[in-house]
Image (cartoon, grey):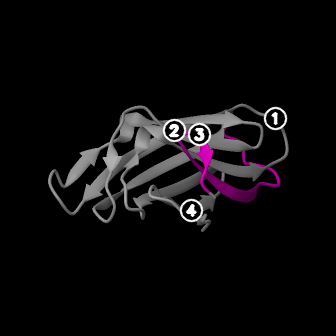
Amino acid sequence: MVTPTPAAGAVKPVVEVKSSFGSTVSQTYKVTSAGTEGVDLSKLVIRYNYTKDGNKEQKFWCDNAGISLNVAPWYVSYTTNVTGTFGDGYLELSFKDAYVLQPNTGNLTIGARFNQADWSSYTNFQEGTVEVYYDGVLMN
């Protein structure tokens, strides 16, 4: 599990990532707000860095995403708002619609996978760091 430490400030998005590896990389992301102000998910970008051999096209799948809350409305489906984009050595998650995750009210949990387009196994895959950006600023 990779857990970056957020920078000091009123807005503190905290992101935890758990990964398992095979012909696909299966991941669970958990996003919470630990600051004094809410985290606007439309301003959040999560970059999962990794290394692998080869340059095959990759595909991203968001199997499910939901915001679980301890206040009404209790649950917000968010699957269609998650976008995965690949760069050179990273997967970047971003979010289409604004939703402000208030401190200590719940979390966003994402179940996602990515794989090589031909479904072949990754060669020499190595998990790297997770970078959390908020409104364009690196938070860790």
- Amino acid type at mark 1: Asn
Spatial separation of the CA atoms under disc 2 and disc 4: 17 Å
Stretch in magenta: 119-139
- Amino acid type at mark 3: Gly
Q: Report helix, strand or loop for mark 2.
A: strand
Contact (CB < 8 A) between labels 2 and 3? Answer: no
Q: Which residue is rendered at x = 42% and y = 43% of the image?
A: 41
Residue position for label 1: 55
- Compare marks 1 and 4 and give the one earlier in the sequence: 4
Contact (CB < 8 A) between labels 2 and 4? Answer: no
From the viewer's perspective, is the residue at label 2 or at label 3 nearer?
3
Residue position for label 4: 6
Disc 1: CA contacts within 10 A as few (<14), some (14-19) or many (>=20): few
Residue position for label 2: 94
Spatial separation of the CA atoms under disc 2 and disc 3: 12 Å
- Compare marks 2 and 3 and give the one earlier in the sequence: 2
Residue position for label 3: 136
Q: Is residue 125 magenta?
A: yes
Contact (CB < 8 A) between labels 1 and 4? Answer: no
- Amino acid type at mark 4: Pro
Q: Is residue 101 magenta?
A: no
* Rendered image: mark on residue 137: none
